[in-house]
Image (cartoon, rainbow, N blue to C red):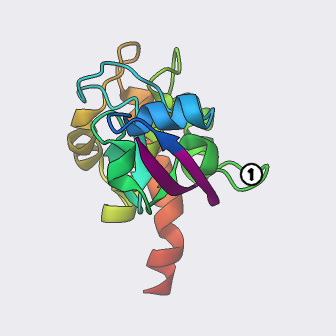
Amino acid sequence: MSEVKLTVNGREVSREVEDRTLLVTFLREHLGLTGTHVGCDTSQCGACTVHVDGHAVKSCTVLAAQVSGASVTTIEGLAEGGTLHPMQEAFRTHHGLQCGFCTPGMIMMAVDIVERHGALDEETIRKELEGNICRCTGYHNIVKAIKAASDEMSAPAMAAE
């Protein structure tokens, strides 16, 4: 057993878990944060994507004990109060979802992509999303949503230059 101490969505948490507990299991079963989904159990689909210390990570590939001491952000922690994050709002506005199962992972990956690249073009978006699978859509509206959000999220940075 290991004691795992994390800051999750800005809140410090501590739990004793089996050493083999995956981060996705820790989030879902120990903290009740079920927005992070388990899709494939093989790191292929990206439904479990969260941010660990500001970087997108597939939480089904990491043991909770490995990230003890880190800061984790899940889809539940992306919005501020009642205001959706610009990426969440863009997915809503541009209907970047169908069944919604992949959506949390797509959004978390998309935020990471924008934070690494700034304003995005369609080619970059499609290349960067290769590790996230949507089985329902043709990705068109997902790409449109990410492009719109990247333009909005990069606007203040571009205006400052």
- Total numbered labels: 1
Where 60 falls versus 136 (above or below)?
below
Q: Is residue 147 left or right of residue 9?
A: left
In the rendered image, the quadrant that contains the N terminus is top left
Where 14 falls versus 18 (above or below)?
below
Q: Is residue 29 left or right of residue 83?
A: left
Where 47 falls versus 23 (above or below)?
above
Residue furthest to the bottom: 161
The image quadrant of residue 138 is top left
Q: What residue did someone put label 1 on?
A: 83
In percent of width and height, residue 115 lies at: 39, 63
Q: Residue at x 23, y 24 (%)?
A: 42
- Asked if residue 11 can be seen in this view, the reply is yes
Residue furthest to the right: 82
Between 68 and 48, the residue placed more toward the observer is 68
Magenta region: which residues?
1-15
In percent of width and height, residue 80 lies at: 71, 56
112 in magenta:
no
Where 80 falls versus 18 (above or below)?
below
Three-letter amino acid code at disc 1?
A: Thr
- Asked if residue 35 can be seen in this view, the reply is no
Q: Residue at x 54, y 30 (%)?
A: 28
Secondary structure that dominates the magenta span: strand
